[in-house]
Amino acid sequence: MAQTRTYVVLLGVPGAGKGTQAQLLQQATGLPQISTGDLFRYNLKHQTELGRLAKRYMDAGNLVPDQVTIQMVADRLEQPDCTRGALLDGFPRNLLQAAALERLVAPYGGVASAPLIQVEDEETIRRITGRRTCRLCGAVYHLTFNPPRSPARCDNDGGELYQRDDDHEETVRNRLFVYYKQTAPLIGYYFAKGLLHEIDGARSIEEVQQELLALVKQP
Ligand code: ADP
Ligand code: AMP
Ligand code: ZN
């Protein structure tokens, strides 16, 4: 077997804080954040074929078809920055994707842990509707819970902060529905493998980060 790598699967409803935590964990551990949502948005912005295909699913809050999503992740995991592992944010999103990930990472010791960031639905809607994202670096803010130092500008690079097209309330409700129908079964899947770690996501960003960091350093 090849040398073991650290693959962490971040689970949680849309808006639970996966991206926020993954960005902080990336800074703390050097493991790259792989966000399938960010990869699709990058493709959308650069008007690639993949971006055009993904758009209609994303606009409706539905999942992009498995085949293209899995291929995109397989390609990303082969990049040189992933030789120690990766922080998976938003992937897998159903059981088929989980089985595909298992095959991809099996040669490196498999998935190391699957932390589940738990947040109530109403809180998740408050978090998503107040979310603002930097156009330049993808940093995530919240208008009241995690505001930037100057209004509408990113602390890192002054980039414009925008509201994602799919962060409006009707789309958010469908995304939650899709989560419960298709993604929630992953909780049982990782529990059965002894990899699930439930984390109380209702606390501050810093408190959640401390718990996750301890877990990732010692899965
Ligand atoms: P996800 O990647 O799971 O969809 P995000 O990391 O984008 O979620 O977080 C959703 C929103 O909630 C963002 O606006 C973020 O700033 C905010 N947020 C994240 N974690 C917390 C927290 N612990 N407390 C309050 N707000 C948070
Ligand atoms: P996110 O940034 O994780 O909230 O994802 C935004 C949107 O991208 C989702 O609503 C889906 O349309 C699409 N998407 C992200 N990750 C996946 C995935 N693993 N499988 C299918 N679609 C995805
Ligand atoms: Zn920025």
Image (cartoon, helix red, strand yellow):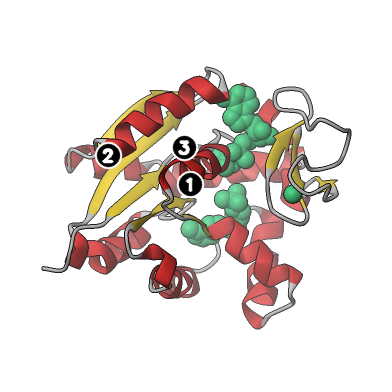
- Label 1 and label 2: CA atoms lie apart by 26 Å
Most extreme residue toward the right is: 151
Q: Residues within 10 Å of mark 3 (few under 14, many from 20)?
A: many
- Label 3 and label 2: CA atoms lie apart by 13 Å
- The residue beneath circle 2 is 188
| Front tag of 3 and 2 | 3
Amino acid residing under circle 2? Gly
Secondary-structure class at tag 3: loop
Most extreme residue toward the left is: 1
Does any portion of residue 213 appear in the rendered image? yes
Secondary-structure class at tag 2: helix
Q: Residue at the location (67% across, 73% down)? A: 51
Does any portion of residue 121 appear in the rendered image? no
Relative image position of residue 143 (x, y in whole percent): 79, 29
| Front tag of 1 and 2 | 1
Q: Nearer the viewer, residue 3 or 178?
A: 3
Is ligand 1 within 8 Å of the beta carbon of the residue shown at mark 1? no
Q: Quadrant of the C terminus?
A: top left
- The residue beneath circle 3 is 12
Is ligand 1 within 8 Å of the beta carbon of the residue shown at mark 3? yes
- The residue beneath circle 1 is 26
Amino acid residing under circle 1? Gln
Q: Earlier in the sequence, mark 1 or mark 3?
A: 3
Q: Nearer the viewer, residue 47 or 182?
A: 47
Q: Residue at the location (43% across, 72% down)? A: 79
Q: Quadrant of the N terminus?
A: bottom left
Q: Residue at the location (69% across, 67% down)? A: 55
Q: Is residue 70 left or right of residue 83?
A: right
